[in-house]
Amino acid sequence: GAVVSQHPSWVICKSGTSVKIECRSLDFQATTMFWYRQFPKQSLMLMATSNEGSKATYEQGVEKDKFLINHASLTLSTLTVTSAHPEDSSFYICSARPGLTEQETQYFGPGTRLLVL
Amino acid sequence: AQSVTQPDIHITVSEGASLELRCNYSYGATPYLFWYVQSPGQGLQLLLKYFSGDTLVQGIKGFEAEFKRSQSSFNLRKPSVHWSDAAEYFCAVDGDYKLSFGAGTTVTVRA
């Protein structure tokens, strides 16, 4: 149980285009989902927290207009990188937290590697 | 604010030998503590977690961790390492329902 998927796993795009990454909880409902960014050989940095049906809460220094997050249902959150630039190239990982039974545990997706040319 | 320190950046261990990864945390209240493992190019898999109760926690893949409040530590151990245990290991603390991760420890397993 507690499986989280991400799509796509790899994406290459041109500078200036927008890219959407999906995060789904497959076998549980997630009241809260998180988006992280990970640079090579580094730890995970929390970008934002999203709760179903409400606006995402962004961490300090994360541009909310550049990284649009939508948590439309209890099983789906999306991250859209708008007007992507090469410096946005990174490994993006989402996680989901089951609402009632495991409020403190986050389950992670397999990640999406973004390369902006 | 909470924080996590993993003092060892890289550990090399022989297959079959024991492994211990160190983790120290800083948090004002009783922490929720986690160990995750990440294989190259993959997401994070939960190994084990501590919320309360027994300070020795058993996890998947033969791992265990011991919570020591007096030392603010949550070290991960495995008695006998397999080649498939080569990966990046992250310790994390949950404060206010947000995870803070340590820098990670890379484990290399030699034959």
Image (tube, rainbow, N blue to C red):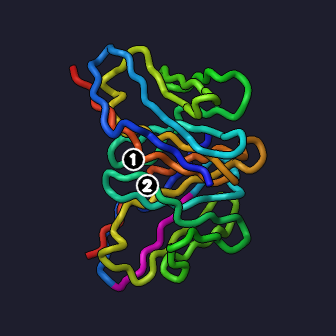
Circles 1 and 2 on the same subunit? no
Residue that appears at 32% across and 51% down? A41
Q: Does the magenta stretch include residue A81?
A: no
Q: Quadrant of the N terminus of chain A?
A: top right
Q: Residues within 10 Å of mark 1 (few under 14, many from 20)?
A: some
Gap in Å between the C-alphas at discs 1 and 2? 6 Å
Q: How crowded is mark 2: few (under 14 residues within 10 Å), some or many (20 or more)?
A: many
Residue A53 occupies quadrant: bottom right
| Residue A102 spot, x, y in % from top left | 71, 42
Q: In which quarter of the image is the C terminus of chain A?
A: bottom left
| Residue B54 spot, x, y in % from top left | 69, 21
Q: Are marks 1 and 2 in contact (CB under 8 Å)?
A: yes
| Residue A82 spot, x, y in % from top left | 45, 81
Q: Mark 1 points at which residue?
A: B42
Residue A85 occupies quadrant: bottom left
Is residue A58 shown left or right of residue B9?
right
Q: How many labels does the image show?
A: 2
Q: Residue furthest front?
A: B70
| Residue B3 spot, x, y in % from top left | 55, 49
Which residue range is magenta in the image?
Answer: A16-23
Under circle 1, the secondary element is loop
Q: To which chain does the residue with label 1 belong?
A: B
Q: Name the residue under label 2.
A: A111
